[in-house]
Image (spheres, coloured by chain):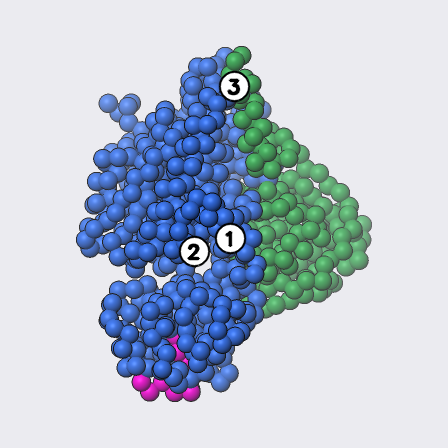
Amino acid sequence: MKSRKPRRLIELLGCAALGCAAALAGATPMAIARSKVSYQTPDVLLVRQDGKTVSLQRELDDGRPVLLNFIFTTCSSICPLSSRTLEEFQQRLGAEAARVHLVSISIDPEQDTPARLAEYARKFHAGPEWQYYTGTVAASIAAQRAFDVYRGEKMSHTPVTLMRAAPGKPWLRIEGFVTPDELVHDYRTLLGSR
Amino acid sequence: MLLTLGAGALGTAHGAGGAGEAIYRQGIAPSGQPVEAVRSDGPSLRGSDAACLNCHRRSGLGWTEGKLAIPPVAGPYLFVPRGKSLAELGVPFVDTAHVIHDPYTDESLARAIRDGVGSDGRPLNYLMPHYRLDAKAMSALIAYLKGMSVKPAPGVTPEVLHFATIITPDADPVKRRGMLSVINQYFVDRNNAAARTKAPTLYSSHTTMFRVERRWQLHVWELTGTPSTWEKQLREHLAVQPVFAVLSGLAGSDWEPVEKFCEQQAVPCLFPNVEAPAGGDADFYTVYFSRGVLLEAELISPQLTGAAPRPQRVIQIFRSGDVGVAAARALQRAQGSAGPPVVNRILKAHGSPEELAGALREVGPTDALVLWLRPGDLHALGGLTPGTASVWASGEMGGLEQAPLPPEWRRVARLAYTVDLPGQRVVRVDYALSWFRLRRIPLLDEKVQVDTYLALGLAAETLNHMVDAFVRDYLIERVDMLLDHRALTGYYPRLSLAPGQRFASKGGYVVRFTEAQGTHVAPLGAWVTP
């Protein structure tokens, strides 16, 4: 009994230090939460993996359905799973994949240079319709804030996938580890309700 | 005998690191084939993408990402006997370990790894893939997990944490004094503060290991002779006095043997003062504040290719035996074949400044001049004319805004500047400077001393978070995780690391002097990360 109190104290200290806000879900599957949300795309310039400076608004509003997520290339646990899921999503869509714009924005833009993003894109067999974006720290944070994924620093990020059928429509926000099949289902449902 | 050896020792006994280690770290099965893993209705993984270390980390002590705690898998955390607490078993607390689970057996652990079912029969997190391992591979992996040591590393005793700092023989003697004055005082202060604190308030009655304030003891390892002998000297130092980690340190032109030592001996080396780091992001045990002059070369390079009109030649001036050699090489590499031809004019090591006139011969208005020079040489440019208006110089080597460039050179020179601008860093740097003032530490080299103070603060902060898990790999992993939270970042606008990132500050400015005298500089553009 004597050892309990100190341990709890230490747990609290550790948790406070990490800024881990909620329960830690090590041994149970993370529930998936879906919601429809309207976001205002910020007027920021980002740099695409091909080195071109582009407007985020224009990239998202090119008329195609958009799937958006936030990653960093040295993230070795959550992001590879999210990126593999998008890769499988594209494969499962087959020829239709060419009509969906996949947008992955770096939350570690100083490390994730266009060259590093291009390398990361190759690893996940990203076709021309799946593009990666970096830019200044301020631009990346503005984008993260606008889509409510900014958690202060990169290690605090959570898996979030956003999907939108067309410009002007609300976004489907999916929190948690969604499977490729679920993602395809979400996509078809979203397009059907367009 | 084998039972008394740690995982590392077992690894070496098996040559290339042991079959279990190969699965855990590289995702290579004993057959030599890549390990394969799947997720229910999810993407499959193979090889290094399936390596356990990606999530559970090299230490096996787990990782936290967002709201997700990836639990420790080092044996002692998996096989806690029912009714016993980790504390009772002397297993250190880690903040990912309070995922309560029934103790594993070899069988239930194999089921968890193969089928994603926990010891309590419930499915594990979706992030955990299901591994296709045969019996041989599974037993090798489980043996490896069981062998992962969570005991205090060498250099940690119940009363003392031993640290070293490393100084190479060619390090600048003034910087050396500056760095040591900060480290010595930091250790004195820390131990005084610890002594004033009441006897440990957070501890377990069973192990008395929790939160016991250990005294910090410093060992200064001064290297001698040629770089080829340094690794051997360091191994001897480590054998005589094991240390938990190397804190700060000071290089001259070469740090590669030290970096290799840290990597091979698995000793964390935190933020040494190195102007031209030899290692890369693929290494694990050394973390740096910045890539120093190598980063400067990459800041200058696009300026040369983008200049209008484009220079016909790039003339680099540097001294042999100094970091300018590595910087000049980096610039030449960055220029590639697309850039103008690069001409290197190399001055003798420790030679006289009079050589400069020769190096500047026939430099014309169509040339670009890059100076990888120390303050003594910059000062000696007085009386010589630049010959061109395209002049770049190393801020790191020249002394940042204190660089003693003569007036006619200040008008044309642009400095590579890999730290935050003076006005923007003043509050963060003042924190260190007032600490020095209060303790009457002479200001001998502001940047080295402030960086050293920052390195020590980061080490102390990280060790606090580690509570009593004195595992060397875990120290590096915690630095990776916690650095982004740091508010006081000294000379740097931001510091950030991650697995596979070994340089915490990634960018810089190009600046120029705004006045004929003084230290006012203005950036020629935004902070850039090349």
Shade of chain B as shown in the rendered figure: blue
Spatial distance from mark 2 to mark 3, Cα to Cα?
Answer: 54 Å
Camera-nearest residue between B117 and B353: B353
The 10 Å Cα crowd at callout 1, few under 14, some 14 to 19, many 20 or more, is: many
**Residues at marks 3 and 1 on the same chain:** yes
Relative height, residue B381 to residue B436 (above, below): below
Q: Which of marks 3 and 2 precedes in the sequence?
A: 3
User: To which residue does mark 3 refer?
Assistant: B102
Q: Are marks 2 and 1 in contact (CB under 8 Å)?
A: yes
> Which is more foreground, mark 3 or mark 1?
1
Q: Amino acid at mark 3?
A: Asp
- Residue drawn at point x = 53 percent, y = 34 percent: B70
Spatial distance from mark 2 to mark 1, Cα to Cα?
Answer: 9 Å
Q: Which of marks 1 and 3 precedes in the sequence?
A: 3
Chain to which mark 3 belongs: B
Q: Amino acid at mark 1?
A: Val
- Residue drawn at point x = 54 percent, y = 56 percent: B426
Looking at the image, how many numbered discs can be counted on the residues?
3
Residue B502 visible at all: no
Q: Amino acid at mark 2?
A: Glu
Camera-nearest residue between A104 and A74: A74
Shade of chain A as shown in the rendered figure: green
- Residue drawn at point x = 44 percent, y = 40 percent: B459
Q: Which residues are magenta?
A: B361-370
The 10 Å Cα crowd at callout 3, few under 14, some 14 to 19, many 20 or more, is: some
- The image shows residue B41 at horizontal and vertical percentages of 59, 39
Chain to which mark 1 belongs: B
Taking the image as shown, residue A88 lies to the left or right of residue B257, namely right
Relative height, residue B529 to residue B85 (above, below): below
Q: Are marks 2 and 3 in contact (CB under 8 Å)?
A: no
User: To which residue does mark 1 refer?
Assistant: B429
- The image shows residue A163 at horizontal and vertical percentages of 71, 51
